Image (spheres, helix red, strand yellow):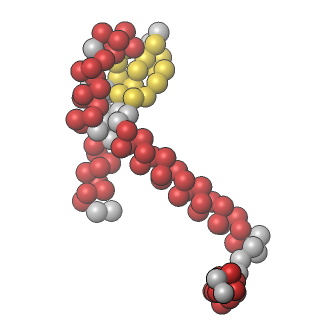
Amino acid sequence: MTDKEADDMAKHTIDLDRDIRPVSDFRAHASAVLKEVQRSGRPVVLTQHGRSAAVLVDVKTYQDMVDTLEVLKDIVRSRADFAEGRTQSHSEVREHLLARHE
């Protein structure tokens, strides 16, 4: 893990004192909460009736999570394909691609 990756992970760690807020607090201070999420990069957990109800994250963090999930899904699918013998050699793929572009 690089130093940047470690810093990014630490940035997304929830601070239990500051990052868990009741939804009523969010309603009253929405602009300030949004600015803090964008500035810090940390998620905010919103609670309703004392229980977690939603997590607010900045757009970049959300997009990174979606992208990572897609890569992980691709890895799971490829491992299943490999386990089931659904593979092709490099030369088979090369021949197929060359034939498509002739």
Q: Is residue 54 above or below residue 9?
A: above
Residue 30 is drawn in which quadrant?
A: top left
Q: Name the quadrant containing residue 78.
A: bottom right
Residue 58 falls in which quadrant of the image? top left
* Residue 92 visible in rendering: yes
Q: How many marks?
A: 0
Q: Residue at x 29, y 26 (%)?
A: 34
Vertical arrangement, residue 77 with respect to residue 28, above or below = below
- Horizontal arrangement in the rendering, residue 58 relative to residue 53 (left or right): left
Question: Residue 70 at what x, y percent from top left?
Answer: 54, 53
Which quadrant, please, contains the N terminus? bottom left
Residue 57 placement, left or right of 34: right
Q: How far from the left and from the top, in percent, is residue 24?
A: 37, 9
Could one spot residue 13 in this view of the protein?
Answer: no
Residue shown at 24% from the left, 59% from the top = 3
Give coordinates of residue 93: x percent, y percent.
66, 83
Question: Is 5 in front, or is 62?
Answer: 62
> Which of 47/34 is in front?
34
Q: Nearer the viewer, residue 74 or 9?
A: 74
Residue at image location 39% in from the left, 14% down from the top = 23
Identified at 28% across, 45% down, the residue is 10
Percent position of residue 25, x then y: 32, 12
Between 100 and 34, the residue placed more toward the observer is 100
Farthest residue, direction front: 102
From the image, which quarter does the C terminus lie in? bottom right
Q: On screen, 94 above or below 65?
A: below
Image height check: is 16 above or below 96? Answer: above
